[in-house]
Image: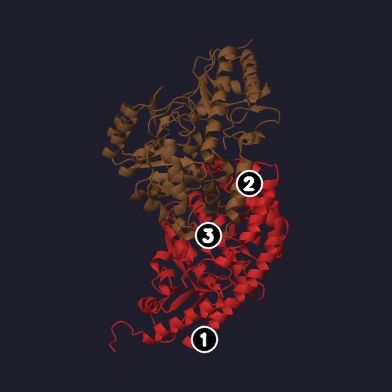
Chain colours: A red, B brown
Amino acid sequence: MQTTQSEVSADTIDLALGHPSPALLPLELLREASARRLRQEDRSCLQYGYEQGDLRFRAQLARFLSWGYAAEVSPEELFISGGVSQALDLICTLFTHPGDRVLVEEPSYFLALRIFTDHGLRIGGLATDRHGLVPEALRESLRKTRPAMLYTVPTHHNPAGTTLPADRRERILELCREHGVLLVADEVYHLLTFAGAPPPPLGSFAGSGGVLSLGSFSKILAPGLRLGWIQGARPLLRRLATCGFLDSGGGLAPFTSAVVGGLLERGTQETHLRKLRGIYGSRARTLVAGCSKLLGVAEEPPAGGFFFWGRLPGIADTEALLPEARAAGVTFVPGSRFSTLGGQREFLRLSFSYYEEPQLEEGVARLAEAARRFRPPGKGP
Amino acid sequence: MQTTQSEVSADTIDLALGHPSPALLPLELLREASARRLRQEDRSCLQYGYEQGDLRFRAQLARFLSWGYAAEVSPEELFISGGVSQALDLICTLFTHPGDRVLVEEPSYFLALRIFTDHGLRIGGLATDRHGLVPEALRESLRKTRPAMLYTVPTHHNPAGTTLPADRRERILELCREHGVLLVADEVYHLLTFAGAPPPPLGSFAGSGGVLSLGSFSKILAPGLRLGWIQGARPLLRRLATCGFLDSGGGLAPFTSAVVGGLLERGTQETHLRKLRGIYGSRARTLVAGCSKLLGVAEEPPAGGFFFWGRLPGIADTEALLPEARAAGVTFVPGSRFSTLGGQREFLRLSFSYYEEPQLEEGVARLAEAARRFRPPGKGP
């Protein structure tokens, strides 16, 4: 959830929303998959499940990820989660202590930062550029302090849209290992690539330790399932699977994973993902073309994910634009919300996932209207 | 999960298991409920959900609980969880800090204790008697230290089977409020009463604050759904619903709650619960009759829940009996596992939920065989 609907009026185009389009939620596929699974006499999906996640489902997921990542993924290195937020919460509980430091990219996903704050962690922002996290900034930081973990969104970054090149991935991993820092990679947008192919996910390096890679069905199937995974080396997964919460309640998703397993088995998830890539890619281009034409935005469309991150010429603080935008019937997330250092004020994040193209065009037109009417605070007419 | 299947051989009767019977998992009901819900064109169950849980589902759940608790429950005082273990984990994250003290009954549910330990909490055991937690013991403890919370299983206690009388409930609540201690009541067995009617659940007092009552569909429907609830006053629920984890991922169970909502709506859950009460009650009586006849156990059958808690005449430490029991093809949880004070050694916990009556009788016969062969450590033949 990126925002609550109650904050905006019914006809507002809410470009803050990080939700998939309602029309892209595959009700028919899940209807068929549920019916198919529940026709079987096997009741195991209703029972307490194996803590790491059902083995058959992990095998199905491993095959899907091996295809999607173009790299071999083993069922043994997968732990079934209730989505990325749940995974992050559990990782904080088990691998950090209040007062510990967590390093994040500047800017970073603001709701992950809230999860860290709930766990009493202190957040340190690291410099990024148009290729994502700058390894030198990490190196400098590690010289001075010893954080419990580094949280990164390596591919189609939320909000910045950047993708770390392969050499930076290796360098960052090397630095984390050298300093004993857990590398937590939020790879939720990796599979949602619509232009080119990103470098191998950090999950590919999980086998040799020190990395937990988080994935989810929220962006590629349906958030309501609350189903995701953590890819990591066995000793790390063992700590997750043997914690009190899991030991008491068993695996996190026996029922939903059984339903989704059928979709993986039959290749339906792959077909659906290909469809999403086409649609979201087209939406991204439409949104950014509008921003370029009507707002003079210079940034290129993102190559994947749900979000566009850009600057509006002449607007130094997008937070100040928000009231005018709301009045014009559109909203967005101001860049400052993603900053741990009080920066990013000139940026804004626009989502292209929720709305169809005509609404995206209308949203951009409203934003342009708001920008035209906008008078920076302190400057009279 | 009370134990992992891999610990015991295939033909062992595992009376440690706290699982429902496979045959009692209502596959047909969930097949119909899923089909009915997913035939509707409403895709909201696939989207990110409202943080506190879907309002319609909370209204359905409130009606069911009002019936089950014989006391009015409001949808506003319900938060939808991923089950009791998930709820406990979240409560620990948000309402405690490492080093805080949590008070529990002696004995207490051993896997809850592990959740507390994962959160760095220090555990203090409080005396109980055959009516459950002794209020005087709580009062004494509160005179000396200020814990973050009290964790109690007020009805059909796991493991002890006790049910707190109404006057003790009020006294305990009063003490907690007086000392500003959060009262966390694990009421997962309350609805599973097969003899008499327990006093009102602690959830009934939630409205006036200071209490979080945890419930679940795991024991009354299917653990694989990972679906439960927290009943509490609005300010407490607000803290839960606005945490970073929920803010990021939305409500915890949009899909599964939509499926189960249909069962609540049509009264199917009530019918199923009535059936379970009959079956589990009969199993409890069969198990205890066997223990009485073959082992000379003096305790009465429990009035609800999943477990029997008893002493075996002549056996001072049931842990020592475990190897002999395993050799005879039966297992159980020794009383010491539930103790925070190194006590309860003369007790054992036997589950009657998983097996049907002939297997329960066979399990007791094997246990009697093990007890006959048993030589206490240090005593030669």
Q: Position of residue A52 (x, y in %)?
A: 62, 47
Amino acid type indicated by mark 2: Arg
Residue at image coords 65%, 15%: B369
Looking at the rendered image, the disc whose residue lies closer to the viewer, 1 or 2, is 2
> Which sits in the foreground, A363 or B344?
A363
Reading the image, the residue beneath label 2 is B31
Instruction: State left or right for residue A96 relative to residue B330.
Output: left
Amino acid type indicated by mark 3: Ser
Instruction: State left or right for residue B339 relative to residue B356.
Output: left
The residue carrying pointer 1 sits among few (fewer than 14), some (14 to 19) or many (20 or more) residues within 10 Å by Cα, namely: some
Q: Is residue B83 above or below residue A290?
A: above
Q: Is residue A226 above or below residue A316?
A: above
Reading the image, the residue beneath label 1 is A292
The residue carrying pointer 3 sits among few (fewer than 14), some (14 to 19) or many (20 or more) residues within 10 Å by Cα, namely: some
Pointer 2 indicates a residue of which chain? B
Amino acid type indicated by mark 1: Ser
Task: Give the Cα separation between the discs numbered 2 and 3.
Answer: 19 Å
As drawn, the residue found furthest toward the front would be: B266
Q: Which mark is residue B44?
A: 3
